[in-house]
Image (cartoon, rainbow, N blue to C red):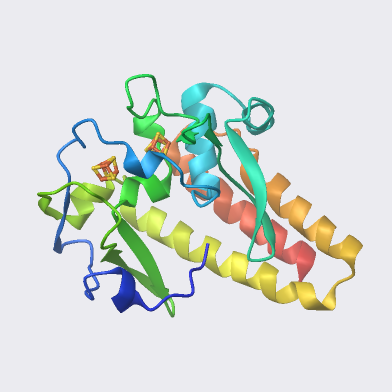
Amino acid sequence: MRRYVDLKDISDGKLYGLTDMVKADCHGCKGCHACCTGMGDSIVLNPLDMWRLTRALGCPFQQLLALGKIELHIVDGCILPNLAMTGTEEHCSFLDADGRCSVHSARPDICRLFPLGRVYEGEDFHYFLQSGECPYPSKTKVKVSKWIDTPLYESNRQFLLQWHKLLKQVEAKQPGLSEEERKTLCMTLLGTFYNWNCSDEKEFYEQFRAAATEFCSQFE
Ligand code: SF4
Ligand code: SF4
């Protein structure tokens, strides 16, 4: 989800790379779950997030929707899934009774980064530290690569760049389409990139690349 803000208003003004140290470590959060509460529809899931969740839970995409764990909304012209917030306190549907993440090893990209964010520039991206978002009082420095806990980093980076580009292409294509064509495009995107059946992370990246090629050839 794109945010139209000035980076200097929401960060410490610096951009970080994978090997940089950043003051983001909140030491296991110690009972806090502020960033798992009241997030509305902002925790948008990418195809890898959905693959990780469905694999960890043994629960397909449609079932997660039916159970109210995730929901759909329109983001920059595309219909995409997000984590559902539930209950009177609007907790993430995966927060357990002890206030901990019940899907920690399969948590989505946005949760992995927090309180870091990602800013895309040209054909690359950098990380930034969101200021004022995490209330933990004495965060310490940690290497970005350790904090984001992302295996197969280069494959992941290529996937994120390709996904970002593909979403922008889908959005750009829509003004010239009829309502029916727009709906077909959005539903095909959803069906193509969120119903996975692959067994390891390496296979995910391979299948994503193949699916992206096929999808783009259909809508060129
Ligand atoms: S707001 Fe900060 S301390 Fe609280 S759960 Fe999120 S990352 Fe942890
Ligand atoms: S998936 Fe886990 S870390 Fe992410 S918002 Fe939900 S409970 Fe919090």
Considering only vertical position in the picture, is 67 above or below 81? above
> Is 152 on the left-hand or right-hand side of 179?
left
Q: Can see residue 13?
A: yes
Q: Can see residue 152?
A: no
Q: x, y (%) of residue 69?
A: 57, 31
The quadrant in which the C terminus is found is bottom right
Q: Residue at x 69, y 49 (%)?
A: 190
Q: Quadrant of residue 172?
A: bottom right
Q: Residue at x 83, y 78 (%)?
A: 176
Number of numbered markers: 0
Q: x, y (%) of residue 14?
A: 21, 74
Considering only vertical position in the picture, is 27 above or below 13? above
> Is 141 on the left-hand or right-hand side of 214?
left
Location of ligand 2 given as a quarter of the image: top left
Q: x, y (%) of residue 52?
A: 47, 36
Q: Quadrant of residue 96?
A: top left
Viewer-proximal residue, 184 or 140?
A: 140
Q: x, y (%) of residue 98?
A: 32, 20
Viewer-proximal residue, 194 or 95?
A: 95
> Is 66 on the left-hand or right-hand side of 51?
right
Q: Quadrant of residue 5?
A: bottom left
Q: Residue at x 9, y 49 (%)?
A: 138
Q: Residue at x 49, y 75 (%)?
A: 4
